[in-house]
Structure formats: structure tokens, C-alpha cells
Image (tube, rainbow, N blue to C red):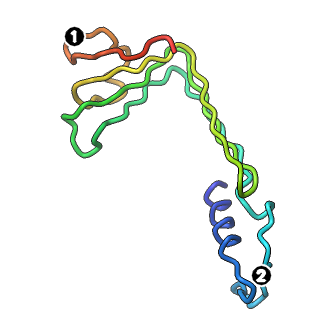
Amino acid sequence: PHFQAQKRFKKAVRIESDDTDEFNIPLKEKVEDDDCLNLDFRFWLLDPTLVLPSDPLDSENVCFSLQSDYGLFYRFKSVGLHYSCQEVFAYDLALVMLNEYLTPSSCKGLRKDSIYSPKTLIEGL
């Protein structure tokens, strides 16, 4: 649904007074809010471990891991042309820095393991 809404939005914004659609029917001159991205997207992650590499092309560079034992909630909302917001809720979130890239399953719970030299930057957020 997001890609369809985005396609519709781009089409609505590009409208000029003499434009017609594929059936040669004149398009509106004014862009209505109803023609735009009115989205409310939400997802929940239970027991997440997200890995954010500093350089996606080099696995030997530093990476960051977001970890939570309880979960994370994300919401994106847009209404019309001029309003959008994002919300993130987490409980007991930790940000850990690692010397090299590890897969999410490998770095699960790596807050104090000395083999990979993790450094916990934030705990209990």
C-alpha cells in the first residue's frame, strides 16, 4: 500500500493544467490532500537485535547493535502534503559498539563478551 500511495502522490504533485491521463482525460489542477500519502504504518519487534554497520561495504569496520530483551515499537504517520511524524518506543534498549560487523544472531546479548571487544554506549534506555 505504501508504494501505491507514493506513486499516486508523485502523480498528483506533477499535475499541470493541460495534463491528461492514459485515457486522455484531463487531470485536476489542484492537488487535494486525499490524493496524497495518508499512511499509518506500525510494527513491533519482540526481543530485537538490530545491527547497523558504519560502512556496509567493509565488514571489518565498526558496527553498532541495538538490543532489547523486551521489544521495540515503531510508527510512521503522514497526513496530507505537509505533516508526517515518527515514533519509537523501546524498553531497556542498549546501544553496543563492536569492532567489526557481526550478524544479529551472533551479537545477541554481547554486552560484556570480551572476544569481540564490545563497548556498551547506552544501557537501559
Give the percent coordinates (x, y) of residue 114.
22, 10
- Other residues around mark 2 within 10 Å, as few (<14) / some (14–19) / many (≥20): some
| Type of the residue with mark 1 | Ser
Instruction: Please tell me whether residue 70 is drawn above or below residue 37 in the rendered image.
Output: above
Residue 119 versus residue 103: which sits nearer the camera?
A: 119
Instruction: Please tell me whether residue 72 is drawn above or below residue 92 in the rendered image.
Output: below
For marks 2 and 1, the one nearer the N-term is: 2
Mark number, residue 114: 1
**In the shown orientation, is residue 104 left or right of residue 74?**
left
What residue appears at the point 42 percent right and 16 percent down from the top-left corner?
122
Residue located beneath label 2 in the image: 27
Instruction: Please tell me whether residue 109 is drawn above or below residue 103 in the rendered image.
Output: above
What residue appears at the point 61 percent right and 59 percent down from the top-left corner?
3
Q: Secondary structure at mark 2?
A: loop
Q: Secondary structure at mark 1?
A: loop
**In the shown orientation, is residue 54 left or right of residue 82?**
left
**In the shown orientation, is residue 62 left or right of residue 27?**
left
Total marks placed:
2
Residue 96 versus residue 44: which sits nearer the camera?
A: 96
| Type of the residue with mark 2 | Leu
Give the percent coordinates (x, y) of residue 112.
30, 8
- In whole angstroms, how far apart are the C-alphas of marks 2 and 1? 63 Å
